[in-house]
Image (spheres, rainbow, N blue to C red):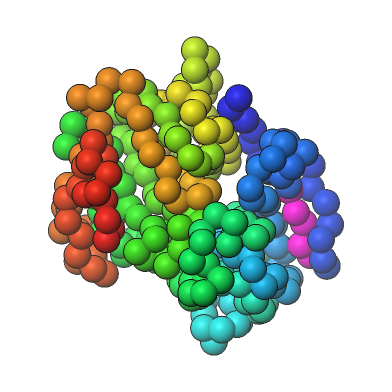
Amino acid sequence: MAVHLNVDRVRAEDLAPGVRRRSLLNGDVVPGIKFRLDCLEMEARAEFALSVAPGDLAWFQVLRGAIDVAGAGGHQRLSDAHVVFLPPGFGGSITAESGAALLVAQVPDAAALDPGFAAQPPAYRVVDWKNEPLLESKHDARKRIYLATPALFGTQAIKGEMIIYPPRTEAPRHYHLGAAHFMYFLSGGGTAYAGDESFAVREGDLVYYDDRETHALRGGEDADMVFSEFFVPAGAKTVWVEPEKACTWLPTGKNVRGGKPSREIRAHSFSRPESTGGV
């Protein structure tokens, strides 16, 4: 059954001086869930130690503000254009100069989701999603930006992407086999569908869909609806209620800023799973 909540309505708890955590998804909210999802809110000049246990992996997305990250990649200044993927055993710290908010996910025992994880764990990776290749749907006005795939992050444990729905754009109904996933809405709003139910979504909303749960989305009337979407594990098969409407994604040759993207990507269709390799 779908879980729908807004981050501002979730109780915050003190985690460290100047740092509060809102627990969004865990075993209490969704029994048997394979990951934990939190929102961290940092006051100006707050610092937080970030570590990943051996055998686990994690990632975080900057929602607002700017942060400094110290760790395996040295010191980096990151903004709301960045998503960071953390390998097992990572240790570092995050400092917020003027206040910030992060969406943080942790996947325990990632080897249970990816048989090759222990032998070849993924490396630390920072993604500027506004510089990644922008793809557009062949059938409608939706746009997609890949954040983490097995080819990009080196593991089958997770998959992630940014999705943009221009006003009044609607996706065909579908469901996934072999993975649960969530959407976090960054801007704009619209309508989400879960089975026979529908509900409004807006900035700061989270929607979690379990395996095999039919769903769809429709953009609002005025502005783009933008959200990040993650799957655990990556190898979900998508089943379309109307197979002829299976998504086909075409490269635009641009990033979301309109400039040259950081890499090239080819067209692929989700009606043929083998065509999605290498994205």
Image coords of residue 26 (percent x, y): 71, 44
Q: Nearer the viewer, residue 142 or 265?
A: 265
Point 42% across, 48% down: residue: 235
Asked if the stretch drawn in magenta spans residue 20, the answer is yes
Q: Is residue 218 left or right of residue 117?
A: left
Residue at image location 48% in from the left, 74% down from the top: 120
Coordinates of residue 266 in the picture (x, y in percent): 17, 56
Looking at the rendered structure, the number of numbered marks drawn on it comes to 0
State the image coordinates of residue 207 (x, y, percent, origin top left): 56, 34
> Residue at position x 17%, y 50% from top?
267
Question: Residue 8 colored magenta?
Answer: no
Q: Residue at x 65, y 60 (%)?
A: 109
Residue 90 position within the rendered picture, expressed as x and y whole percent measured from the top left: 63, 76
Q: Main secondary structure of the magenta part?
A: strand
Q: Residue 14: which quarter of the image?
A: bottom right
Would you identify the image quadrant in which residue 18 lies? bottom right
Q: Which residues are magenta?
A: 18-22
